[in-house]
């Protein structure tokens, strides 16, 4: 992550492991990306409903979707990309309208 400039980016990780809560995930990401705004994805979803709870969060996911060396393999599931792999992965993903990936 050191080789990519996350300055002024909004990063919204979505941690779905409700058993242990977020377990420091967002603060850990924030410590690696001090110039980015890191939001709690589930809290953001809940805040948008107006009732403090999500109406429904639907996800259809494909492991590594959009990154040729990560797609359809569990090798990278739950793992941190190496300094060499991160820029390769980001280069294959389009930036969203929010300025994130």
Image (cartoon, rainbow, N blue to C red):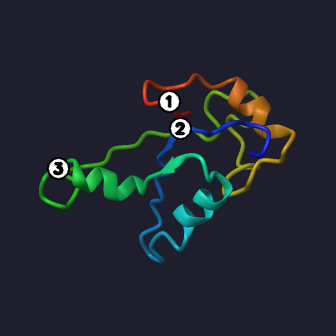
Q: Nearer the viewer, residue 14 or 4?
A: 4
Residue 69 visible in this rendered orientation of the protein = no
8 on left or right of 54: right
Residue 9 visible in this rendered orientation of the protein = yes
Q: Nearer the viewer, residue 48 or 38?
A: 38
Residue at the location (64% across, 61% down)?
31
Label 3: state its secondary structure.
loop
- The reply to whether dot 3 and dot 1 touch (C-beta < 8 Å) is no
Name of the residue lying farthest toward the right: 84
Placement of 18 over or under 43, stated as above or below: below
- For label 1, the residue is 99
- Check the picture and name the quadrant holding the C terminus: top right
- Give the mark, 3 or 2, whose residue is nearer the N terminus: 2
* Callout 2 crowding tier (Cα within 10 Å): few <14, some 14–19, many ≥20: some
Disc 2 and disc 1: Cα gap in Å? 6 Å
Disc 3 and disc 2: Cα gap in Å? 24 Å
Residue 88 image position (x, y, % from top left)? 79, 30
- For label 2, the residue is 9
Residue at the location (53% across, 38% down)?
9
Residue 83 image position (x, y, % from top left)? 84, 45
Residue at the location (43% across, 24% down)?
97
- Give the mark, 3 or 1, whose residue is nearer the N terminus: 3
- For label 3, the residue is 49
């Amino acid at each position: 992550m050191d080789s990519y400039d996350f300055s002024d980016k909004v990063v919204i990780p979505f941690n779905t492991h409700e058993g242990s809560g977020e377990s420091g995930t967002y603060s850990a990401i924030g410590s690696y990306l001090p110039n980015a705004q890191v939001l709690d994805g589930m809290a953001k979803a809940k805040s948008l409903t107006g009732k403090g709870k999500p109406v429904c969060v639907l996800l259809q996911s494909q492991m590594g979707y959009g990154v040729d060396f990560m797609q359809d393999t569990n090798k990278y599931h739950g793992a941190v990309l190496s300094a060499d792999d991160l820029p390769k992965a980001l280069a294959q993903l389009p930036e969203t309208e929010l300025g994130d990936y």
